Image: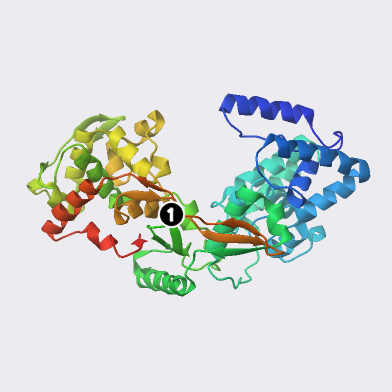
């Protein structure tokens, strides 16, 4: 930073090599001066023309201001997660004190945030991701001889003792707001938001408040079962609009309330994948009347050991039809059906329905194996709602949206949601097989999803 003239040529070369090796844009080689330009004047779009403008403006800024002034402007504009822009705002928000009063460990935490605030923020980021990032900051400080090894060790020892602010934030639908904010920053850049925009979202505030109460009540009722958190998302599968979005039972809970379960928590989906598996089976000609043997079965050589699935109640029922197996969420028949249709085809169907983590790559297939039908993989609640929306929308997938319209501070329209693009993932005939076959059993009906919104 103190040696370059606004653009780091070596950094650009490294970024170019990384992009060529990755087959896409994975690095930009931006300097602090370029990032300042991007945050204040330009967008985050990844185009050559934008990078050229960025480089020219960075050169002009370097000519006009000192390095100390540029660094100060950057630190006062950089995003630090959530509503915090600038190091002063972040210092007060996270610790309740001025930057000049921070300890080494507190300063190191803040120093690591601008690289990826949505991920590293202690409030809204991935759980404990800030700790790994802070270790990297301290290590680099020690390597560059800004601190000694003893100072590094002392700071690391204080990591778990750091106290963050516990002030409550009175924000309606906070997790949804930050979800939308992350998307807008990725699409348009932080500069647009800093300049002031009016965003009309898809959220139904009345339903959102009811959803928040439902989640809180359920967590309270499940207290004796050691359930500490929960989330809920509801969508309109006909147009992809997100209607309610409850990221945790209480955003202001100091332990983990600010962690967004809906879009950031990868969790095992359990038996929710069974309808998707049987949909893949029906595509191959199996029917609700197909008979599967629900008996103790050993699947040899699944990874390093044999795989012996069991039902939730530990019992076996002998020959059962698919409609009964799905209606009662039996595990053994589900695993047998997966072995019959093939792991690749099941994962391909799940992937096309919206479960991005189920892409049928060789690595994913090797990792999951036959446990995939019982939720052995991981996905987010938002992706699960996307997939179930396909059942509720006549087999058509519509990408989820959280924004209806964006206008700038002068009222000029920047974005307006158009007619949703639909992609047929499941055929009407397959869905009819589902409804007739499963409703006949009378135990479990996907038809209940056809209420205008898909609830997961």
What residue is drawn where x is 27% and y is 37%? Answer: 370
The image quadrant that residue 199 belongs to is: bottom right
Q: Quadrant of the N terminus?
A: top right
Q: Nearer the viewer, residue 214 or 207?
A: 207
- Does any portion of residue 169 appear in the rendered image? yes
Q: Position of residue 43 (x, y in %)?
A: 69, 47
- Residue 215 in the image: above or below residue 403: below
Q: Report whether 89 appears left or right of 180.
A: right
Please count the marks in the image. Answer: 1
* Observer-nearest of 368 and 185: 185
Please provide percent x and percent y for residue 100: 82, 58
In the rendered image, the quadrant that contains the C terminus is: bottom left
Position of residue 387 relative to residue 92, above or below, is above
Q: Which residue is mark 1?
A: 382
Q: Residues within 10 Å of mark 1 (few under 14, many from 20)?
A: many
Please state which of residues 371 and 357 is positioned toward the viewer in this rendering. 357
In percent of the image, x 31 and y 33: which residue is there? 344
**Colour scheme in the image?**
rainbow
- For the point 83% across and 41% down, the residue is 58
Question: SS class of the residue under badge 1?
Answer: helix
Q: Is residue 64 left or right of residue 267?
A: right
Q: Which image quadrant for residue 200?
A: bottom right
Is residue 79 shown to the viewer in this render? no
Residue 293 in the image: state x and y as whole percent.
Answer: 10, 41
- Measured as percent of width and height from the top left, residue 455 is found at 35, 62
* Closer-to-camera residue (357/351): 351
Residue shown at the point (47%, 57%) measured from the top left: 261
Q: Relative to 235, is 364 above or below?
A: above
């Amino acid at each position: 930073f103190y040696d370059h003239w606004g653009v780091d040529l070596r950094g650009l070369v490294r970024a170019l090599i990384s992009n060529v090796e990755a087959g896409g844009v994975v690095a930009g080689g931006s300097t602090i001066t370029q990032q300042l330009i991007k945050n204040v004047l330009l967008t985050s779009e990844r185009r050559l023309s934008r990078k050229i403008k960025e480089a020219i403006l960075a050169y002009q800024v370097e000519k006009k201001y000192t390095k100390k002034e540029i660094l100060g402007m950057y630190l006062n504009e950089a995003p630090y997660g959530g509503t915090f822009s600038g190091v002063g705002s972040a210092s007060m928000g996270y610790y309740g004190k001025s930057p000049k009063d921070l300890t080494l460990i507190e300063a190191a935490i803040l120093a690591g945030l601008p690289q990826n605030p949505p991920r590293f923020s202690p409030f809204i980021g991935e759980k404990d991701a800030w700790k790994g990032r802070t270790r990297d900051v301290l290590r680099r400080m020690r390597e560059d001889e800004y601190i000694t090894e003893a100072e590094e060790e002392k700071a690391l020892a204080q990591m778990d003792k750091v106290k963050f602010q516990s002030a409550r934030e009175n924000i309606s639908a906070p997790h949804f707001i930050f979800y939308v904010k992350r998307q807008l920053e990725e699409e348009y850049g932080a500069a647009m938001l800093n300049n002031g925009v009016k965003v009309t979202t898809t959220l139904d505030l009345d339903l959102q408040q009811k959803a928040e109460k439902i989640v809180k009540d359920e967590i309270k009722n499940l207290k004796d079962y050691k359930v500490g958190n929960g989330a809920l998302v509801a969508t309109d599968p006909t147009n992809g609009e997100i209607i309610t979005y409850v990221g945790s039972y209480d955003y202001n809970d100091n332990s983990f309330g600010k962690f967004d379960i809906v879009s950031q928590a990868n969790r095992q989906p359990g038996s929710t994948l069974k309808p998707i598996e049987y949909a893949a089976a029906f595509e191959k000609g199996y029917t609700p009347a197909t008979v599967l043997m629900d008996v103790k079965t050993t699947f040899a050589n699944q990874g390093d050991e044999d795989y012996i699935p069991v039902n939730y109640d530990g019992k076996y029922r002998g020959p059962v039809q698919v409609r009964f197996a799905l209606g009662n969420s039996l595990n053994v028949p589900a695993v047998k059906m997966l072995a019959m249709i093939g792991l690749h085809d099941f994962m391909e169907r799940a992937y096309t329905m919206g479960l991005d983590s189920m892409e049928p790559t060789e690595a994913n297939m090797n990792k999951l194996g036959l446990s995939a039908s019982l939720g052995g993989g991981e996905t987010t609640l938002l992706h699960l709602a996307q997939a179930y929306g396909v059942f509720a929308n006549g087999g058509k997938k519509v990408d989820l949206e959280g924004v209806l319209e964006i206008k700038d501070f002068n009222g000029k329209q920047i974005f307006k949601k158009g007619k949703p693009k639909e992609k047929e993932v499941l055929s009407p005939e397959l869905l009819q097989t589902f409804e007739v076959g499963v409703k006949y059993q009378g135990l479990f009906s996907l038809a209940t999803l056809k209420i205008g919104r898909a609830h997961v």
